[in-house]
Image: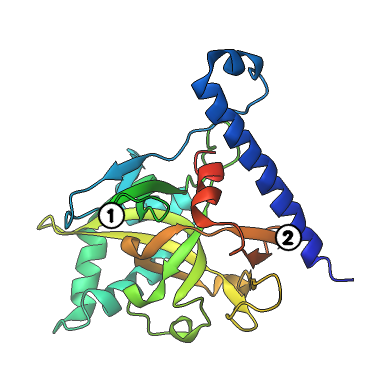
Amino acid sequence: MDAIPQIIQGYMWEHSFAMKELNMEAWANLEPSIKERLKGVLSQKRNSGTISKVHGEEVYMQLQGKRSNVTKIDHVVEEFQIRNLYEHIRVFLHNNIYSKSTAPESDVENLMNAGKVETFNSVEIPVLEQDTSEQNVYILYHLRCTAKRAWRIQEARHDIGWVRLAQNKIQSVLARAESFSNRVPGQVNAMFILQRQNRQFYRLAHVSLLQVIGSPTPKGPEGIGYVQRRENRTGDIVVWLRSLEGMTHLIPLEPGHRWIANNRIDYHTWNELNDGL
């Protein structure tokens, strides 16, 4: 028996209940007496913020939650438990920074040995609001990676976000991997800035790319795709931070290993329900 339709239906019910809760919150904000009656019924949420920009004004991702105890690549390896980080950074620098250098090996080693590192717990990503008549309004969403640290008295966070492959020069089998319109879900393992001695810096992320199962074109009445973890961390890679495009909405089939890549619940509502958790 195919349980996938039932799994999706269960998540749709959960989504529907959460929408009703949002409606009750709106009523409570309009009428104090309703707010008092619903006290203890509604769960507390931290809703996503918004920003408005003048037409043509640039918007930027913002790294947040700087760690004071991490200043070198060695510290990142230890704190975030990424044993092959040196090699992954080295490959990234060769392909994306020093590909035209006359002495790429020397340049890479100099930066990795003498460069300063700053790491962060989260990144705030502005996403253009589609559900408003106003132009240049952005909703602020977050991807979080807390390494071994608990997040708000709960377990550590290692969010899975969309990674835009075309933003990076990749010379490996990952460059030919199946994707959803050139995007692949990837677990965020670390977010950091690598700064040269001349103060030029690079904002980077270490991610574990998931593997698309079968065709990346959603099929069937559910309109879904499937992803799973790659074996032996073969999807681990360093990418530009700017290639992260917000949270991936995954429905677990085998928790921690295999998921449905959800595209049935609208993007903005999902984030309204989950981003502040």
151, above or below 31, in the image: below
273, above or below 221, in the image: above
Q: Which residue is mark 2?
A: 8
> What's the residue type where badge 1 is placed?
Ile
Q: Nearer the viewer, mark 2 or mark 1?
A: 2
Q: Which residue is mark 1?
A: 193
Judge the density around disc 2: few (<14), some (14-19), many (≥20) Cα neighbours within 10 Å.
some
- Residue 200 placement (x, y as % from top left): 14, 59
Is 40 displayed left or right of 127 in the figure? right
Which residue ends up furthest to the right in the rendered image? 1
Secondary structure of the residue carrying tag 1 is strand
- Residue 93 placement (x, y as % from top left): 28, 72
- Residue 97 placement (x, y as % from top left): 22, 74
13, above or below 108, in the image: above
Q: Quadrant of the C terminus?
A: top right
Residue at the image position 69 percent from the left and 59 percent from the top: 252
Q: Contact (CB < 8 A) between labels 2 and 1?
A: no
- Residue 224 placement (x, y as % from top left): 64, 71
Secondary structure of the residue carrying tag 2 is helix
Judge the density around disc 1: few (<14), some (14-19), many (≥20) Cα neighbours within 10 Å.
some
> What's the residue type where badge 2 is placed?
Ile
Residue at the image position 49 percent from the left and 47 percent from the top: 147
Nearest to the observer: residue 192 or residue 54: 54
Does any portion of residue 77 appear in the rendered image?
Answer: yes
